Image: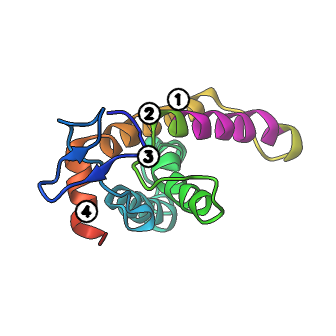
């Protein structure tokens, strides 16, 4: 579904406008009340303060936090972008927004970070985990079901 800022919703819940006559209207993205964001932050907390210290399997020790990066961090950044006027709509994150932030974080965390922080290590598996999390988040955020769940949780 295209990301158009000119989509308005009529009482029947359908988009109106010359190029949107038969499409469902896009729902508002819930940002910090988004169900995926809340779940990712919750799972991150469990992993950080319970599973890892308890000696969890390698995936939990090494890559779960990386997988959760986009679902847990992107809504916060996009909300800030909206507050500062850099984002002009409240639609779910577009694939280009997800991809841009994935690329920036991969370069910063796995390329530049190890050059600046002596304890940091570049790990291509981390980038794969970032990408898998981004793909998962994008599929959830861009699905029609996610729009319905976000609307039920977030007024407006």
Magenta includes 109? yes
In the picture provided, is 138 more to the left or to the right than 69?
left
Real-space CA distance between mark 4 and mark 3, rounded to the nearest whole angstrom = 17 Å
Q: Is residue 146 shown to the viewer in this render?
A: yes
Circles 2 and 1: CB distance less than 8 Å? yes
Q: Which residues are magenta?
A: 99-114
> Looking at the image, which is closer to me, 153 or 88?
88
Element assignment for label 3? loop
Which quarter of the figure has residue 108? top right
Element assignment for label 1? helix
The answer to which of marks 2 and 3 sits earlier in the sequence is 3
Give the residue number, with chain letter if any, for mark 2: 132
Q: Quadrant of the C terminus?
A: bottom left
Real-space CA distance between mark 3 and mark 1, rounded to the nearest whole angstrom = 32 Å
**Foreground disc of the pair 2, 3:** 3
Q: How is the image coloured?
A: rainbow
What numbered label is drawn on residue 7?
Answer: none
Real-space CA distance between mark 2 and mark 4, rounded to the nearest whole angstrom = 26 Å
- Identify whether 40 is placed above or below 59: below
What numbered label is drawn on residue 5?
Answer: 3
What numbered label is drawn on residue 151?
Answer: 4
Residue positioned 50% across, 35% down in the render: 129
Give the residue number, with chain letter if any, for mark 1: 128
Which quarter of the figure has residue 143? top left
């Amino acid at each position: 579904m295209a990301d158009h800022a000119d989509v308005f919703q009529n009482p029947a819940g359908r988009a109106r406008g010359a190029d949107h006559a038969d499409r469902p209207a896009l729902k508002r993205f819930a940002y910090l009340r988004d169900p995926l964001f809340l779940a990712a932050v919750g799972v991150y907390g469990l992993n950080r303060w319970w599973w890892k210290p308890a000696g969890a399997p390698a995936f939990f020790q090494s890559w779960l936090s990386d997988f959760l990066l986009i679902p847990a961090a992107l809504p916060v950044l996009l909300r800030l972008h909206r507050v500062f006027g850099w984002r002009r709509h409240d639609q779910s994150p577009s694939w280009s927004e997800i991809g841009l932030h994935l690329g920036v974080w991969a370069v910063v965390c796995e390329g530049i970070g190890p050059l600046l922080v002596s304890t940091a290590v570049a790990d291509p598996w981390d980038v794969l985990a970032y990408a898998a999390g981004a793909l998962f988040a994008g599929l959830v955020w861009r699905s029609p079901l996610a729009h319905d769940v976000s609307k039920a949780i977030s007024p407006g």
